[in-house]
Amino acid sequence: MKLNLSADEVLSTTRSVRKRLDFDKPVEREVILECLDLALQAPTGSNSQGWHWMFVDDPEKKLGLRNLYKRHFDEYTKYSREWPEGDMRAAQKEGVRSSAEHLSENFHKVPVLMIPIIEGRLDNAPVFQAASQWGSLLPAVWSFMLALRERGLGSAWTTLHLPAEQEAAELLGIPFDKVTQGGLFPIAYTIGTDFKPAKRLDTSNFVHWNNW
């Protein structure tokens, strides 16, 4: 089912979905592959197409990934970033924390998990190489999330399993010495589809013309 959103609506309402992931509704492989077909239209450096996509729906392997994620999530939450008084991000902090904890506890209940992968190891890579490699993967990942949104599904961009990337590789048979994982993404239908644009700081906080 497509929501028939405009391009601007898809771009402005594709959220990191955590608490509104439907753990009980199965996600059809055909829908995932349809979204992936669209994602693979994204640009990739020198047309290399050096991406791979690991989808996990085996319950034991999902639990294994959840345990790797939660181990580092619990450590990460000990270090809380503080925002200046009056900064909208301070007001949003508790909601973000609560939704992140919910996902951490329930990662294994999500119908499908996805790990995007790029060929080559990027450990200690020079900026040029790292930017080129990530730039050949991450646009497709975002396109995949946009395609999910149009079809009533959601996801969240997470990276906290990556300190245990090699353990995840062993769990899933990924050739750790040859490729690099780019994150861990839950995939599920969303509970409701009425997502709104997020509150963001004004562009004047980030824009530079000709000089910093």
Image: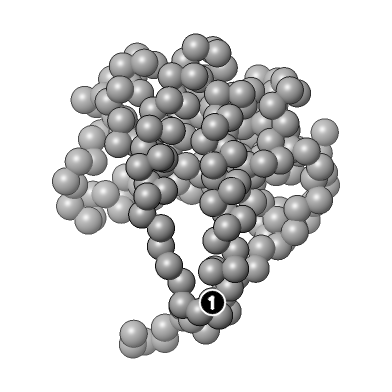
Up the image or down, 194 lies above or below 20; here it is: below
| Front in this rendered view, residue 11 or 23 | 23
Query: Is residue 144 in sight in this rendering?
Result: no
Residue 10 relative to residue 131: left or right: right
Q: Which residue is at 80% across, 45% downward?
A: 193
Residue 170's place in the image compared with 158, above or below, is above
Q: Is residue 188 left or right of residue 84?
A: right
Quadrant where the N terminus is found in the figure: top right
Task: From the image, tell me which residue sits under label 1.
Answer: 87
Which x, y percent locates residue 159?
A: 41, 41
Q: Where does residue 143 sit, x and y in percent of width and height?
A: 58, 45
Q: How is the image coloured?
A: one colour
Residue at 34 percent of width and 85 percent of height: 212
Q: Residue at x 61, y 55 (%)?
A: 95
- Residue lying at the far front in this picture: please name it: 78
Q: Residue at x 36, y 16 (%)?
A: 171
SS for dot 1: loop
* Residue 203 % position (x, y): 55, 79
Q: Is residue 123 above or below residue 60?
A: below
Number of numbered discs on residues: 1
Kind of residue sitting beneath label 1: Asp
**Rendered location of residue 53, percent (x, y):** 47, 27
Give the camera-side residue of 21 and 210: 21
Give the quarter of the image for residue 190. Answer: top right
When asked about the image quadrant of residue 167, the answer is: top left
Q: Residue 29: in sight, yes or no?
A: yes
Circle 1 Cα neighbour tier, 10 Å, few/some/many (<14 / 14–19 / ≥20): few
